[in-house]
Image: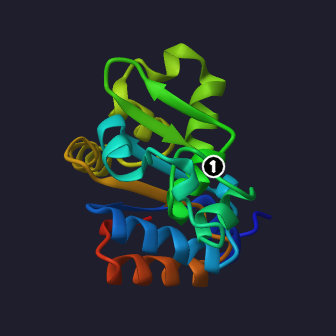
């Protein structure tokens, strides 16, 4: 008999949200960290342009030693690419992939799945990558437009149904768009 408990169901459903600015994306990421999620449990999708505009720093010595960026990244000292919890984690996530010709960077479990699929797994562009990760096509199209417009997509597979609801609620409070499972 299959286990249909709410915690098992939540593990199979990813919560995703699009954030249109750096501050809201970082607040959403910090909420995940505060709930105990690791950088390996969350995916981040953004354009190269957005990464360079919001998250790259010229002088790594400017990184604040006590910031959540360094804490989330699990490193000390200057990290060289980002300041802020979200991007400190982005810098430290082991698997990231760039979609050729699209200028999109994907980090986290979605990237790991695509890397495992090989080059053929990303030929459908960003929509194909998101749909391939289990996202409905209409939502993937919305997110693609948002990412191309400078937004940051964050997704996580919650540990429990209660956490899924909490994440959805908090992300909406932080300005997340189309926050859903």
Comparing 9 with 30, the one in front is 30
Comparing 175 with 55, the one in front is 55
72 to the left or right of 129? right
Q: Quadrant of the N terminus?
A: bottom right
**Residue at (74% x, 58% y) in the render:** 76
The answer to which quarter of the image holds residue 111 is: top right
Q: Colour scheme of this structure image?
A: rainbow
**Residue at (65% x, 36% y) in the render:** 95
Comparing 169 with 97, the one in front is 97
- Residue 14 seen in the current view: no
Q: Neighbour class for label 1 at 10 Å: few (<14), some, many (≥20)? A: many
Outermost residue toward the right? Answer: 1
Measured from the top left, where is residue 171 in percent x and y?
A: 40, 76
The answer to which quarter of the image holds residue 127 is: top left
**Residue at (64% x, 79% y) in the render:** 35
Q: Quadrant of the C terminus?
A: bottom left
Q: Which residue is mark 1?
A: 79
Q: On screen, 120 above or below 139?
A: above
66 to the left or right of 129? right
Q: Secondary structure at mark 1?
A: loop
């Amino acid at each position: 008999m299959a286990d249909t408990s709410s915690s098992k169901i939540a593990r199979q459903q990813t919560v995703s949200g699009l954030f249109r600015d750096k501050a809201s994306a970082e607040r959403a990421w910090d909420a995940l960290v505060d709930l105990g999620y690791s950088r390996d449990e969350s995916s981040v999708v953004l354009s190269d342009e957005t990464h360079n505009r919001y998250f790259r720093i010229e002088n790594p010595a400017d990184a604040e030693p006590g910031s959540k960026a360094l804490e989330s990244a699990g490193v000390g000292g200057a990290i060289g690419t980002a300041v802020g919890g979200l991007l400190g984690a982005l810098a430290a996530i082991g698997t990231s992939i760039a979609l050729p010709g699209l200028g999109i960077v994907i980090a986290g479990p979605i990237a790991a799945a695509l890397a495992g699929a090989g080059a053929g797994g990303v030929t459908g562009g960003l929509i194909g990558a998101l749909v391939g990760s289990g996202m409905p096509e209409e939502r993937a199209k919305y997110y693609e437009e948002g990412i191309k417009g400078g937004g940051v997509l964050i997704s996580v597979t919650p540990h429990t149904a209660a956490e899924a609801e909490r994440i959805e609620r908090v992300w909406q409070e932080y300005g997340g768009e189309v926050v859903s499972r």
